[in-house]
Image (cartoon, rainbow, N blue to C red):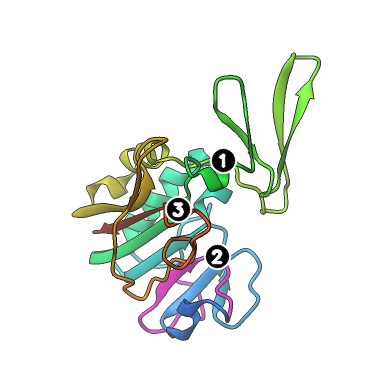
């Protein structure tokens, strides 16, 4: 089923497409979100199939959205992205990189170094006396980061999805390990990414987000 309100040649933007977003100035872009706030948005739950036919979309962008979706659901959404892209179409994914010192400063870790919660993004940690272990409590309004991306996490999700069949997959920004930040230049291609240098220099020019382009 094709959603009503799509332009003739739509580009998909996952999440709210606010008027302050550069993509809002590009008439092809339509936001897919749970709570539409403007005429450029369509109500859609990203846990459901995308409301467009196979091989029909030239550009898709997911900016700071995937980390709000349960991690085990992400491969299915990537399958959908691959399904609807035209051959040669592009998908740009950006998620926060939890190897960035900027993000580490606001997170809680367990004794093995695993991230338990991002305290700025809808989560807190409590001690479960019954099980003698910490537990993470997430806000249920959609604001919480439900998983904490690293290069390895994102690569694993790609390999579990049909999107691994893309003709080209390019990681532009990411932390390879705790010491190595990669920030290669990439074309904007109408898909502006806000949380990355040189626009965002809170990390001194080092990576803040994992930014990946997929060409079908």
| Span colored in magenta | 2-19
Pick whichever, 177 or 51, lies toward us.
177
Pick whichever of labels 1 and 2 is earlier in the sequence. 2
Q: Secondary structure at mark 1?
A: helix
Residue name at image x 56 percent, y 73 percent: 42
Nearer the viewer's eye, disc 3 or disc 1?
1
Instruction: Kindly identify which residue carries mark 1.
Output: 104
56 falls in the magenta region: no
Q: Characterize the local packing of mark 3: few (<14), some (14-19) or many (20 or more) Cα atoms within 10 angstroms.
A: many
Pick whichever, 4 or 193, lies toward us.
193
Pick whichever of labels 3 and 1 is earlier in the sequence. 1
Give the left or right position of residue 160, taking residue 74 as reference. Answer: left
Give the distance between the C-alpha atoms of the residues marked 1 and 2, in whole angstroms.
25 Å
Nearer the viewer's eye, disc 1 or disc 2?
1
Q: Residue 175 lies in what quarter of the image?
A: top left
Instruction: Kindly identify which residue carries mark 3.
Output: 209
On the image, the x and y values in percent for residue 165 come to: 23, 48
Q: Residue 152 lies in what quarter of the image?
A: top left
Q: Characterize the local packing of mark 1: few (<14), some (14-19) or many (20 or more) Cα atoms within 10 angstroms.
A: some
Pick whichever of labels 3 and 2 is earlier in the sequence. 2
Q: Which residue lies most toward the right here?
A: 129
Q: Secondary structure at mark 2?
A: loop
On the image, the x and y values in percent for residue 170 come to: 26, 53
Give the distance between the C-alpha atoms of the residues marked 3 and 2, in whole angstroms.
17 Å
Pick whichever, 119 or 178, lies toward us.
178
Instruction: Kindly identify which residue carries mark 2.
Output: 15
């Amino acid at each position: 089923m094709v959603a009503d309100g799509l332009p003739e040649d739509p580009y998909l933007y996952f999440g709210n497409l606010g008027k302050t977003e550069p993509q809002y100035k590009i008439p092809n872009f339509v936001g897919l979100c749970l709570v539409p706030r403007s005429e450029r948005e369509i109500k859609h739950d990203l846990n459901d199939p995308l409301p467009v036919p196979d091989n029909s979309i030239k550009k898709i962008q997911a900016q700071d959205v995937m980390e709000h979706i349960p991690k085990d659901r992400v491969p299915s959404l990537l399958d959908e992205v691959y399904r609807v892209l035209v051959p040669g179409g592009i998908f740009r994914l950006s998620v926060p990189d939890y190897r960035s010192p900027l993000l580490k400063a606001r997170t809680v870790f367990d004794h093995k170094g695993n991230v338990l919660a991002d305290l700025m993004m809808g989560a807190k940690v409590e001690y479960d006396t019954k099980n003698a272990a910490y537990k993470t409590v997430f806000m249920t309004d959609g604001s919480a980061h439900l998983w904490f991306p690293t290069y390895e996490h994102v690569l694993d999700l790609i390999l579990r999805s049909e999107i691994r069949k893309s003709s080209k997959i390019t990681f532009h920004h990411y932390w390879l390990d705790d010491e190595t930040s990669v920030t290669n230049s990439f074309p904007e291609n109408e898909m502006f990414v806000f949380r990355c240098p040189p626009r965002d220099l809170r990390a001194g020019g080092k990576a803040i987000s994992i930014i990946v382009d997929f060409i079908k």
